[in-house]
Structure formats: C-alpha cells, structure tokens
Amino acid sequence: MNTVTELPFNKLLNLEAATDDTHLLRLPAGGQYLNHLGTVHAGALLALAEASSGEYLLRSLGGTDGIVPVVRRLEAKFRKPANGVTTSNATATDGALDELRAGLAGKGRGLISVNVELHDSSGAHVLSATVEWFIATAPRPNSPD
C-alpha cells in the first residue's frame, strides 16, 4: 500500500492526499460530512485524524511491508467547529521513530504515538489528536523444506 487513501473506508470518505506540501491529507467539503449544526461531523474529523497518523507512519517507515500496524488508542480534543475542506499535519516526538525501529528489530514489536492537527478551510485549528499505534513484525510464512 502506498497511501492510506487506498483503504476501502478512507475511499468511502473520499479522503485525499493534500494538494500542497504543508499538509498530509484532506477531507473535501461536502454535505455528507455535516452534523446537525451544519459543521463537519466529529466522526469525519476523527477518521481524518486516524488516517493522517497512518499516512505519517507510512511515509516515515517507507511502507507497511513486513509489519502489522494497529491503532491502540486515540485521544482527541475538538477545538472549534470545522467548516469546508479540512486538512491534516502529523508529527512524532524526537526519537520516537528510532525507538520504534529498535523495538521492531529487537522484540518484533513497538508502540508509537503520532500527534495530529486538523485545520479547516478558514485556517481554524479544529482538532488535536494523539494516535497510539501498536506495530509488530509480520509473521513470516513457513519456508518449504
């Protein structure tokens, strides 16, 4: 897989790669994403945050070949109502990727937290999230004798 936008659920939501170099992903504007207040639904924002953390890991680790990543926890703070196109940025703390790589090499597993920030089309900071991933090396198929 080259990008999380290829996953069936993310295709359903029409998540896209961002059109500029300063963002990871984008949730397009559309009535199907709105809540009862006419702003972007919390579930759509959480889906964008989760997908963005996965996209960050894909880009940072060079793909998912040989590993099995699973979300363990997601914590989010909704800051302002979101309107229109919503874009994402993601980061990990200094050394977190190196610790993950060392855990995968040594124990065959590791944890990493990815911080995600979402902004809407007006530039408003609408959500901050931390997504914790459990990542294990993929089981190797038995080789023929």
Image (spheres, grey):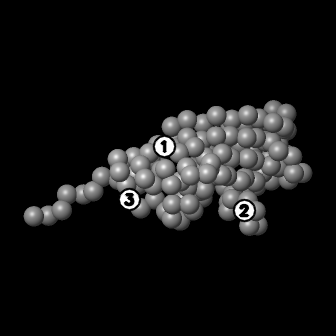
State the residue position of label 1. 111
Going by the image, does 45 lie left or right of 7? right
Q: Position of residue 48 (x, y in %)?
A: 67, 48
- Other residues around mark 1 within 10 Å, as few (<14) / some (14–19) / many (≥20): many
State the residue position of label 2. 18
In the picture, the disc for residue 128 is: none
- Residue drawn at 14 percent across, 64 percent down: 144
Mark 3 or mark 2: name the one nearer the start of the chain.
2
Q: Is residue 140 visible?
A: yes
* Marks 2/1: CA–CA distance: 26 Å
Q: Position of residue 58 (x, y in %)?
A: 54, 59
Q: Position of residue 63 (x, y in %)?
A: 49, 62
Tell us which disc is closer to us: 3 or 2: 3
Amino acid at the residue labelled 1:
Leu
Q: Is residue 44 visible?
A: no
Going by the image, does 50 lie left or right of 140? right
State the residue position of label 3. 66
Query: What is the residue that sits farthest to the left in this orientation?
Result: 145
The quarter of the picture where residue 32 lies is top right
**Badge 2 vs badge 1, beta-carbon distance below 8 Å:** no
- Residue drawn at 65 percent across, 52 percent down: 91
Going by the image, does 119 lie left or right of 132? right
Amino acid at the residue labelled 2:
Ala
Q: Position of residue 72 (x, y in %)?
A: 51, 37
